[in-house]
Amino acid sequence: MMQDTLLDLSNEFTQALEQKISTTKKNIIFLSHYHQYRSHYGNIPNMLKQKYNVIMVGGQELYDAFEQMGHAFVCIPFRAIDEHNNVHYLDITVDNVDLIITADLTTYQEEKIDKEFLSKTAKRLYFPHSLSVPTGAHSTAVDYIAVPSKIALEQYQQSSKATLLKAGYPRLDNIYKSLKDITSSNQSIIYAPTLKQSLENSARAINLLVGHDNILIEYLLKNRASDIIYRIHPYNRYHEFYKLLKLTWKNEKRVIFDESNNYDYFQQAAMLLTDCSTSAYTFSLCTLKPSLFFAPAIRHDIEQHCNIIPIAHNLAELKHYMDAPPPTSYTREPFKLQK
């Protein structure tokens, strides 16, 4: 019964996509399985559609800017979940697709989804979501990687067999244009931790995850007069540790949990703190305001960037960096030279 349903779904989605395929132009698909990285393509879809037939494909219909950028949008999930929470992958392929561009690599089914979903013949171009960490470097599913920075390029050259394109970080273009006032006098502090890799829901794991962030929030509340904008990684919004954090601080007016899908919160802050998220670079490049890593557990991929953004290994160092006056000429030049 489930196999029949999957076949019906696959046929329905295949037909929907086939109707958007051009017979006179080359076809390019922008594929976003997850909504979190839909902004990573910047204005590239609009630029490409001047010459090519551009189709936007997403796993959800969200009525956002991503869906409006190409000639057409088609909602096509790559998997279905039955009533018993079993995951089934859809087999959807069409002809005459020339290029698939994506910021999402699932790695499921030994990369079959990344290699064959929507087309078995199209070339595939990967846009990494990280400015400095070589995500997808070991993937065998992509033909090209749009490398966003010099630091990332060095790492991709050591580990990736794909053709590397020096592409920059298109996501920054639209973010920068959307910011109305980067000189805002608002003195809020953004804390934007990166993805919590452990999704274990045991009491021990939750205690560790909540404990670290609670200590930092308590410290900031005690030592700063600023509001604190807590910006969770989108993949962790439904995890138990985040629910507990929100419950803990629900009556504290100075702690704001921001879950918006835009970057308006950049304008509400004087600086950004993170453990090791490349949101630090995004924030500073777009606003010319300082960022700071707070990472008691030292990581090599952070330390090699300390000449650009400082790293605090403990609360004493955090106080030192936060008390220091902001740079008098905080410009994009240091980032341009090294990114």
Image (cartoon, helix red, strand yellow):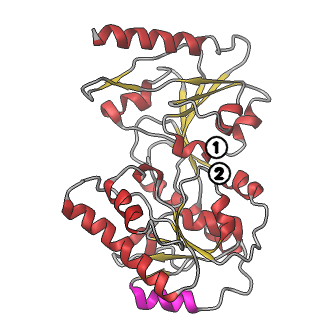
Can see residue 299? no
In the image, what residue occupies the spot 27% across and 68% down? 208
Looking at the picture, does residue 61 appear above or below residue 224? above
- Which residue is farthest front? 251
**In-front residue for pair 87/129:** 87
Q: Is residue 297 magenta?
A: no
- As shown in the figure, which amino acid type bears the numbered disc 1? Tyr
- As shown in the figure, which amino acid type bears the numbered disc 2? Arg
Element on which disc 2 rests: helix
Q: Quadrant of residue 168?
A: bottom right
- Taking the image as shown, residue 244 lies to the left or right of residue 187, namely left
Residue 24: x percent and y percent? 73, 12
**Is there CB contact under 8 Å for labels 2 and 1?**
yes
Q: Quadrant of residue 71?
A: top right
Near mark 2 (Cα within 10 A), the count class, few <14, some 14-19 or many ≥20, is many
Element on which disc 1 rests: helix
Magenta part mainly helix, strand or loop?
helix
Q: Which residue is mark 1?
A: 41
Q: Is residue 317 magenta?
A: yes
Residue 33: x percent and y percent? 49, 34
Looking at the picture, does residue 131 appear above or below residue 327? above
Of the 4 image quadrants, the one containing the C terminus is bottom right
Q: Which residue is mark 2?
A: 171
Can see residue 41? yes
In the image, what residue occupies the spot 43% across and 13% down? 9
Range of magenta residues:
314-323
How far apart marks 2 and 1 lie (CA) works out to: 6 Å
Residue 332: x percent and y percent? 71, 71
